Amino acid sequence: MMRKVALAVLVIALGSVAALAADFNGKWTADVQGRRGTQTITFDFHVDGSTLTGKISTERGDSDITDGKVDGDNISFTQVLNFNGNERKISYTGKADGDNSIKFSRQMGDRPAMEFTATRAAAGSEPPVQ
């Protein structure tokens, strides 16, 4: 009898933890201020357990997400860019802020971190082409 009670408590506890995890799947957009003005970035996230994959799209093109991780309502990944044969890595960390926004910080090299918020894209919508 004690085994059944302990098992039931364990199942409920694990279910509660899973319910606390944010749903990052799908497309998210953000307007990010940069040296050349505001840039719209689209993130297309695919989560499998704690692994995050997907693409980042800007007016300069698409790049794959690498080293992606999800831990509850926290997300982290790297974007690798190539400028004239020079590889640059941008590290992103974020935290879900409700169901439809993520507060991000991104860091490239020794530059100061940049803060921005991404919002969940409406189903079937695409960001405007700039």
Image (spheres, helix red, strand yellow):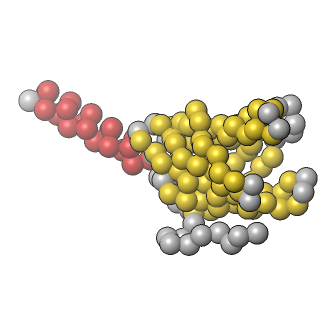
In the image: residue 24, left or right of residue 64: left
Judging depth in this view, the residue of 70 and 5 nearest the camera is 70
> Where's the N terminus, which quadrant?
top left
Most extreme residue toward the left is 1
In the image: residue 50, left or right of residue 35: left
Most extreme residue toward the top is 3
User: Looking at the image, which residue is at 79% across and 33% down?
Assistant: 85
Q: Position of residue 118 (x, y in %)?
A: 66, 58
Q: Position of residue 35 (x, y in %)?
A: 91, 53
Label total for image = 0
> Where's the C terminus, which quadrant?
bottom right
Q: Is residue 119 above or below residue 62?
A: below
In the image: residue 76, left or right of residue 72: right
User: Looking at the image, which residue is at 38% across and 43% down?
Assistant: 18
User: Looking at the image, which residue is at 69% across and 54% down?
Assistant: 61
In the image: residue 44, left or right of residue 39: left
Residue 128 visible (yes or no): yes
Judging depth in this view, the residue of 5 and 69 nearest the camera is 69
Residue 22 visible (yes or no): no
Most extreme residue toward the right is 35
User: Looking at the image, which residue is at 64% across and 46% down?
Assistant: 63
Q: Position of residue 113 (x, y in %)?
A: 81, 41
- State which quadrant residue 97 falls in: bottom right
Q: Is residue 123 above or below residue 61?
A: below
Q: Position of residue 41 (x, y in %)?
A: 70, 57
Q: Is residue 117 above or below residue 86?
A: below
